[in-house]
Amino acid sequence: QVQLVESGGGLVQPGGSLRLSCAASGSGFSMYAMGWYRQAPGKQRELVATITQRANTNYADSVKGRFTISRDNAKNTVYLQMNSLKPEDTALYYCNGGLKTGSTVFDWGQGTQVTVSS
């Protein structure tokens, strides 16, 4: 069973950048499409970005052009590079994945908090 640990969040000023990491334990990481999700206080969890097994990517309109998802199968890790951050990006960020793009078959990790504020 794959376990996921997110890291890299923090407090950043508007316009700043952060790079999130999601490390997966267990085997078979390269078999899975992965995604980054976020949940702001009082809101539902939303999909931010996905990356397929072949590294094809897709983004929510709200982050397109600012965020980049990538993966390193040798390190069992998926990344989210976030640039030009806005206060509305403030949320708890999670990763998850599955055989189908957009699926979330693993137990959710604790997430990593991103706060964008001056």
Image (spheres, rainbow, N blue to C red):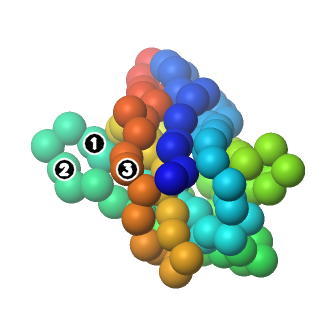
Query: Which residue is more in the foreground, 4 or 38?
Result: 4
Label of residue 40 in the image: 1
Amino acid type of the residue tagged 2 in the rendering: Lys
Label of residue 53 in the image: none
Q: CB of mark 2 within 8 Å of CB of mark 1? A: yes
The answer to whether residue 80 of the structure is visible from this angle is no
Dot 2 alpha-carbon crowd within 10 angstroms: few under 14, some 14 to 19, many 20 or more: few
| Residue at x 28%, y 55% (from the top left corner) | 45
The image shows residue 76, relative to residue 115, as above or below, that is below
Q: CB of mark 2 within 8 Å of CB of mark 3? A: no
Query: Which residue is more in the foreground, 79 or 84?
Result: 79
How far is mark 2 from mark 1, CA to CA?
5 Å
Question: How many numbered callouts?
Answer: 3
| Callout 2: SS | loop
Dot 1 alpha-carbon crowd within 10 angstroms: few under 14, some 14 to 19, many 20 or more: some
| Left or right: where 83 falls relative to 105 | right
Amino acid type of the residue tagged 3 in the rendering: Asp
Amino acid type of the residue tagged 1 in the rendering: Ala
The image shows residue 6, relative to residue 43, as above or below, that is above
How far is mark 2 from mark 3, CA to CA?
20 Å
Dot 3 alpha-carbon crowd within 10 angstroms: few under 14, some 14 to 19, many 20 or more: few
Which of label 1 and label 3 is nearer to you?
3
For the C terminus, the quadrant is top left
Residue 102: image location, x then y, percent: 46, 73
Q: Which residue is mark 2?
A: 43
Query: Which residue is more in the foreground, 99 or 1?
Result: 1
| Left or right: where 40 falls relative to 18 | left
* Sooner in the amino-acid sequence: mark 2 or mark 3: 2
| Callout 1: SS | loop
Q: Locate residue 8: give its quadrant.
A: top right
Q: Which residue is mark 3?
A: 107
